[in-house]
């Protein structure tokens, strides 16, 4: 009897709450460190980037308008759904080269990180907003507002924890995003899209693409409807390209180099603040009994 040929799963991309195949029809094979074929993975194109950014822009208004407490509830729900599929994520991490112990740690830390940021959704404004002293008879308030659409090149040396660690603060602050997953370790990113799809997160808030960084980074960096870009690697040529392309429409560039995302020190409300804009409002102090009211 001949040996059975395993049918490899095709890991699709995630755009607008749907799982389309890349419009180019291209795929690549993900391999284990031992050279075993693990899956067929979509090789995203420039058109996929445009579709994902358009989806993120459409979702931004509704997501940013939600109550901060509700955003926290949804992040917590994502953590619940990830908890229920721990065994699958651990298995995928092991296939991609992690030890069983490190895979369990990565999945547990990813769940905890989602819960961490869910708790900050309705609290970061109190930390970073302010009432400012001014010399005139005005109240002066500074508050944070989400930037809009953020493109993210996920850390390439991790499959799950890096993606979760940079996605969570972006959406906790009311932004929508387009994520380019790890090129060589893409399995958990696409499976995580299935978790997002089965949670309460509206379609389009998070869009996940797979493919080659060298091909897609220029399109993620120079798209005119993107407000900020995150890059988590230390490639000098890529950092230079990002800064040059981002200058075309004054995108904010956020670069975290060579972080170990499993460590607890790499979770902070300051990561939420990195993708916020400060809006300052002046309000005249009304007259009371003919005299100007003081503070």
Image (cartoon, rainbow, N blue to C red):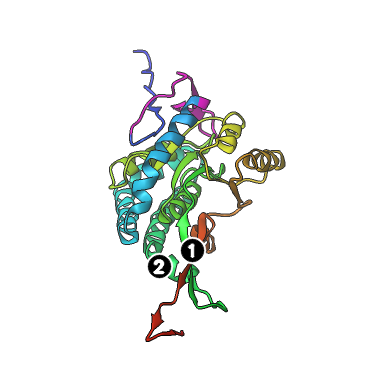
SS of the residue at dot 1? helix
Span colored in magenta = 18-46
Q: Residues within 10 Å of mark 2 (few under 14, many from 20)?
A: some
**Residue in front for this viewpoint, 9 or 13:** 13
The residue under label 2 is 123
Q: Quadrant of residue 68?
A: bottom left
**Magenta stretch: includes residue 2:** no
Residue 262 seen anywhere in this rendered image of the structure: no
Choose the circle earlier in sequence order: 1 or 2: 2
**Residue in front for this viewpoint, 217 or 189:** 217
On the rendered structure, is 295 left or right of 79?
A: right
**Residue in front for this viewpoint, 94 or 164:** 164
Q: Position of residue 48 (x, y in %)?
A: 46, 28
Q: Position of residue 207 (x, y in %)?
A: 42, 38
Q: Nearer the viewer, mark 1 or mark 2?
A: 2
Q: Residue at horizontal 41%, vertical 55%? A: 172
Give the vertical position of 184 relative to 2 (above or below).
Answer: below
- Residue at the limit of the structure toward the front, as seen here: 290
Give the vertical position of 207 relative to 61 (above or below).
Answer: above
Q: Position of residue 295 (x, y in %)?
A: 46, 84
Q: Are marks 1 and 2 in contact (CB under 8 Å)?
A: yes
Q: Residue at horizontal 37%, vertical 42%? A: 59
The residue under label 1 is 269
Give the spatial CA distance, label 1 vs label 2: 9 Å
């Amino acid at each position: 009897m001949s040996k059975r040929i395993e049918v490899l799963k095709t890991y699709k991309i995630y755009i607008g709450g749907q799982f389309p195949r890349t419009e180019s029809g291209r795929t690549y094979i993900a391999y284990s460190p031992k050279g075993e074929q693990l899956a067929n993975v979509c090789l995203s194109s420039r058109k996929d980037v445009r579709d994902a950014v358009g989806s993120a822009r459409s979702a931004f208004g509704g997501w940013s308008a939600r109550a901060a407490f509700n955003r926290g509830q949804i992040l917590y729900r994502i953590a619940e759904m990830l908890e229920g599929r721990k065994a699958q994520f651990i298995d995928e991490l092991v296939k991609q080269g992690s030890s069983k112990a490190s895979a369990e740690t990565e999945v547990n830390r990813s769940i905890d990180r989602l819960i961490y940021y869910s708790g900050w959704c309705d609290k970061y404004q109190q930390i970073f907003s302010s009432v400012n002293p001014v010399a005139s008879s005005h109240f002066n308030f500074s508050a944070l507002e989400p930037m809009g659409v953020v493109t993210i090149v996920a850390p390439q040396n991790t499959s799950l924890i890096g993606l979760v660690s940079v996605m969570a603060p972006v959406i906790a602050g009311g932004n929508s995003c387009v994520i380019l997953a790890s090129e060589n370790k893409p399995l958990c990113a696409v499976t995580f899209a299935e978790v997002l799809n089965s949670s309460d997160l509206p379609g389009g808030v998070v869009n996940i693409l797979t493919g080659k960084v060298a091909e897609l980074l220029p399109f993620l960096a120079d798209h005119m409807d993107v407000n900020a870009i995150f890059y988590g690697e230390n490639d000098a040529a890529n950092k230079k390209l990002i800064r040059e392309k981002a200058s075309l429409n004054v995108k904010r560039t956020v670069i975290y180099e060579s972080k170990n995302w499993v460590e607890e020190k790499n979770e902070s409300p300051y990561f939420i603040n990195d993708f916020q804009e400060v809006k300052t409002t002046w309000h005249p102090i009304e007259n009371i009994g003919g005299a100007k009211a003081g503070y």
